[in-house]
Amino acid sequence: MEPLGVIVGVDGDLATVGMYQMSNNADFLWDGDILVGPKVGAYLTILQNDVKIIATVVSEKIMDQQNTVKSKEFDNRYSTNSINRIIMLKTQGVIENGSFTLTSKYVPMVGNEVTITTNQDLNSIYSITSDEPTICIGESVRESKKINLPINPFFASHIGIFGNTGSGKSNTLHKLYLELFRSKYRQRIFARSKFFVIDFNGEYTQPNQFGVDKSNKKIFNINTRSPEDTIPVTKKYLFDADILSILFDAKPATQIPFLRNAMRKYNKIQSSEEFTQLECGLLKALFRDFKNIEVRFIEDWINNALNMGVESEFLLKLSDMLSSYYGKLQITDVSTYQTEVVFDNFQLTPYGENKFIKLREEMAGAYNDLPELKKLKAFLVFQKIFVTAWKNTNIDFINPLFKRIESSINSLEPVINIVDNLNSCFGAVNIVSLVNANQDVKRLIPMIISKMVYDEQKLKVTNENKVTSTCHLIIDEAHNILSVDNNKSSDSWQDYRLSVFEEIIKEGRKFGFFLTLCSQRPADISPTIMSQLHNFFIHRLVNENDLRMLQNTVPTLDINTFRLVSTLGKGEAIITGNAIKSPILLNVYKESSIRPRSDDVILTDMWQ
């Protein structure tokens, strides 16, 4: 290759090149190939003995040879053959033995000649070793060369995809996993790995999305207006005091200790008989200590049992008698032919004992028919009576908690299904669409799924002492749940949410758990989470805070490439990170049929 110029100055990793005449063409034809000329952003090769130092053009200017002429009348500056072109190069790495390596071992020297980078050298820069499995999702913007991305370094890492609305980030997310599932590893991927897509806008629910059919994919349409699908959640995970404390926004002074003690008892209950024995024992204790408690606690007990669906004439009669009771405790059961005494002198009569046996049977039947969350709610109400009837706990401290319990259970019950284990509950690819969910469910469901599947994966790897399968969590519009400043959430919820995802992104890799985040507002995402991402697809961003976040958290994004972020076209992205050798300006291919539901609206077609 003929030299284009010579280095005339070196400052660290920057080299100044004086270009030879006729070297300012936009493209060059060499050996049958069209090569990109020395314009800003293009690659050039610095020849130093047998080593090829690869550099990118960062700036250019001209120097006039006749700029010392003082007479304006005869000023010949900037005329034909009076100027030389000067360009500035920034070194990126070297090519030795046909392989490109990022290194600062070689520094350009004054006198080194500069040439166009050949296609063979570009292949070394953009590609990887021939035996490395790859996928292709697009081509380089400047050279129009197909870019192969290595499967292992990319998908065994945490990935961030960022860009303004309409910049093409959803297409990039979809294309990335579409090509992975199209690879020759498809069947083993579905056998060994699970993928969970949290889809806030319903963009990935169309048939054959990600190129996966129903046999390997499950779609969960979470609809709080008209319930459709439910998310399987293990009882062991959900009925944990720490999780419930977060879901119910329990306060640390009295409400969290109450939940911990209550759940310790509830998780020991193995059958409806144990439940009814415990709660009927509470009712007996309330009657025995009638002089030291308020009647309203017995009324609360009866109302809770009736709300469970217990069909008992005995309870209804007790409720009527208590509502008009003012004197000595002697509760009677009035039938058609006779009057029977149930309680006399604060003790159950033999007749009363028989009534309680019947009541336990009726309660056991009602308890078995309740959904798991309603069982939990009924138990917690009984526990509230237990801890407040004898003034052990001030009821005014507990009552606000039960308003939140009511709200959370009403939100969760239509959209989750309590299961003993997750066997066969999920497919290889799982799309969780939250487009029709209310704000509470949009806040809770991603948190529940993320923590649950992470704990399952972590436990499996820990037990087997090696990674035999992987789990990939993909969150579109990640700023909705990973914001470091969310005024809609309580402090305890926000702290817990961020701690969970920070643990995932810090420790997940060793357990075969990988995170892919897609967002239009990277500045809203926790800086700790952002700093732990390994690879980035950066589309057009113009917000100053977003740009500053990228500049501070993406170590492989050099300043010259960073300047391109705000000028990228639709579908163009900068790829940078641990998986590639040098930042790549990529044009991501757009699928003609299988793609997310995120296309721009063509108003004139609609109005035609």
Image: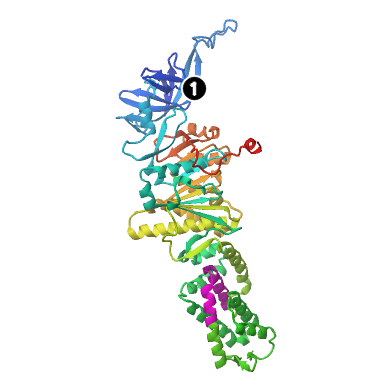
Q: Is residue 299 above or below residue 250?
A: below
Q: Which residues are magenta?
A: 361-387
Q: Nearer the viewer, residue 423 or 242?
A: 423
At x 54% / y 62%, what residue is drawn?
Answer: 246
Q: Position of residue 333 (x, y in %)?
A: 63, 89
Q: Residue furthest bottom?
A: 338
Can the viewer see residue 248? Answer: yes
Q: Is residue 323 above or below residue 573?
A: below
Q: Residue furthest top?
A: 74
**Quarter-of-image position of residue 316:** bottom right
Image quadrant where one finds the N terminus? top left
Image quadrant where one finds the C terminus? top right
Q: Residues within 10 Å of mark 1 (few under 14, many from 20)?
A: some
Q: Position of residue 531 (x, y in %)?
A: 47, 45
365 drawn magenta: yes
Q: Position of residue 444 (x, y in %)?
A: 54, 58
Q: Which residue is mark 1?
A: 60
3 drawn magenta: no
